Image: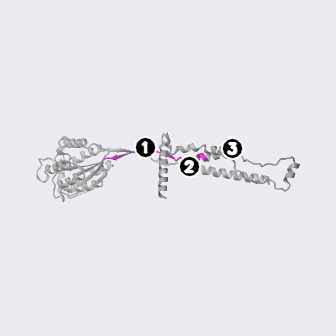
């Protein structure tokens, strides 16, 4: 029995596939009217065909029942024979029947309203920015306009803001690190919110120390839930790692094994001494292990050039998905057919009652 059910299901699916391929639609400025199974309208002449080849329904009964019927007929010089009364439909009954049939076909043809296409960008890349906000980022060794020196974090904010504005099709997240690593903004396409949250960053919000390895470890966890085709991380720090639970080089190795490309940008003047000095070796190792690029940003113009280079290396990769919402309309012709059929039956009943009352 199961094989029969499977065979009927297969036949039904095949027929549905064939019928769907010859769908018909009419475009309008605000959308399109579509019939999924327009081939069903070929059945419109079916009632006429059945009427032509069929015979009227016959109900046999005796009109007059008397024992001397033949004598009466002979006296009246009439020849008895079988007779028939064929009822003829009026114009309203004919028109209503045709309309009901066509409306039923229209409902079976599955009419639907198709909205204009809605395009949605599917990002092909997740980009994570890891920003150092430790105490060393308060050092003012970035020359700005008119020779004015800028705070390291302030310089990063300006360039990152411009960089984010150009990545219109990427999901971008923001991780900050100091004594620990924290998700400041998860991956999002809301770049306006990301830029606002970036502008609100302050030195020391995450503590005084610099734990780059912990930031990379947090990034690995975030990327593990990502389905993006490309996973990219940019570390912005002075490279002076102080007490990470996992060494930056080890974390970079794990990230590389998970398919994460890592770029590193060293922030600060290499000539700076003391606790605020720039450790280039750590960031260079991260970029090398992560198969990314390393750059040193010593002033605004060079830092801007770094991000332009990254923008060239990491081309935007995205898909544009098009979707058209479909709203079924079969209920309208079906409701009209039922209503019209009900009105027809009511009028026939009233007509028959009126004729019976008139003859009584």
Q: Secondary structure at mark 2?
A: helix
- Colouring convention used in this rendered image of the protein: one colour
For the point 24% across and 48% down, which residue is it?
157
Q: Earlier in the sequence, mark 3 or mark 2?
A: 3
- The image position of residue 359, as x and y in percent, is 79, 52
In-front residue for pair 325/55: 55
- The image position of residue 267, as x and y in percent, is 18, 48
- The image position of residue 12, as x and y in percent, is 49, 50
In-front residue for pair 67/253: 67
Q: Residue under label 3, please give it.
A: 91
Q: Quadrant of the rendered structure where residue 208 is?
A: bottom left
Query: Horizontal placement of 254 versus 38: left or right?
Result: left
Q: Earlier in the sequence, mark 1 or mark 2?
A: 1
In-front residue for pair 10/243: 10
For the point 58% across and 51% down, which residue is it?
335
Q: Secondary structure at mark 3?
A: helix
Q: Please check the rendered image and state whether residue 289 is part of the magenta-colored stretch, yes or no.
A: no
Labels 3, 2: front one? 3
Q: Which residues fall within the magenta stretch?
A: 101-124
Q: Earlier in the sequence, mark 3 or mark 1?
A: 3
Q: Residue under label 1, please give it.
A: 117
For disc 2, the neighbor class at 10 Å (few under 14, some 14 to 19, many from 20) is few
Label 3 – label 2 distance at C-alpha: 25 Å
Label 1 – label 2 distance at C-alpha: 24 Å
Q: Is residue 168 visible?
A: no
Q: Residue under label 2, please give it.
A: 332
Label 3 – label 1 distance at C-alpha: 45 Å
């Amino acid at each position: 029995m199961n094989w029969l059910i499977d065979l009927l299901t297969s036949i039904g699916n095949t027929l549905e596939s064939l019928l769907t391929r010859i769908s018909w639609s009419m475009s309008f400025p605000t959308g399109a009217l579509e019939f999924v199974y327009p081939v069903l309208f070929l059945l419109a002449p079916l009632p006429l065909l059945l009427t032509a080849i069929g015979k009227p329904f016959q109900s046999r009964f005796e009109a007059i029942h008397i024992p001397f019927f033949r004598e009466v007929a002979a006296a009246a010089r009439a020849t008895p024979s079988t007779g028939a009364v064929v009822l003829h439909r009026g114009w309203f009954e004919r028109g209503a029947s045709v309309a009901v049939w066509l409306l039923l076909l229209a409902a079976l043809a599955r009419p639907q309203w198709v909205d204009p296409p809605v395009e949605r960008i599917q990002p092909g890349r997740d980009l994570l920015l890891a920003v150092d906000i430790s105490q060393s980022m308060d050092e003012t060794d970035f020359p700005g306009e008119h020779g004015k020196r800028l705070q390291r974090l302030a310089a990063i904010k300006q360039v990152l803001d411009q960089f984010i504005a150009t990545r219109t099709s990427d999901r971008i997240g923001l991780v900050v690190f100091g004594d620990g690593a924290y998700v400041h903004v998860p991956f999002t396409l809301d770049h306006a919110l990301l830029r606002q949250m970036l502008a609100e960053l302050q030195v020391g919000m995450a503590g005084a120390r610099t734990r780059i390895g912990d930031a990379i470890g947090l990034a690995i966890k975030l990327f593990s839930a990502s389905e993006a085709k490309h996973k990219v991380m940019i570390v912005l720090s002075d490279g002076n790692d102080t007490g990470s639970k996992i060494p930056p080089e080890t974390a970079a190795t794990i990230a590389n094994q998970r398919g994460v490309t890592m770029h590193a940008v060293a922030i600060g003047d290499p000539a700076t001494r003391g606790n605020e000095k720039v450790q280039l070796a750590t960031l260079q190792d991260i970029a090398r292990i992560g198969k990314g690029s390393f750059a040193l940003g010593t002033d605004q113009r060079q830092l801007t050039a770094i991000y332009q280079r990254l923008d060239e290396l990491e081309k935007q990769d995205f898909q544009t998905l098009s979707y058209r919402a479909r709203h079924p309309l079969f209920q309208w012709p079906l409701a009209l057919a039922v209503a019209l059929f009900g009105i027809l039956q009511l009028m026939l009943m009233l007509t028959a009652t009126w004729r019976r009352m008139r003859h009584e």
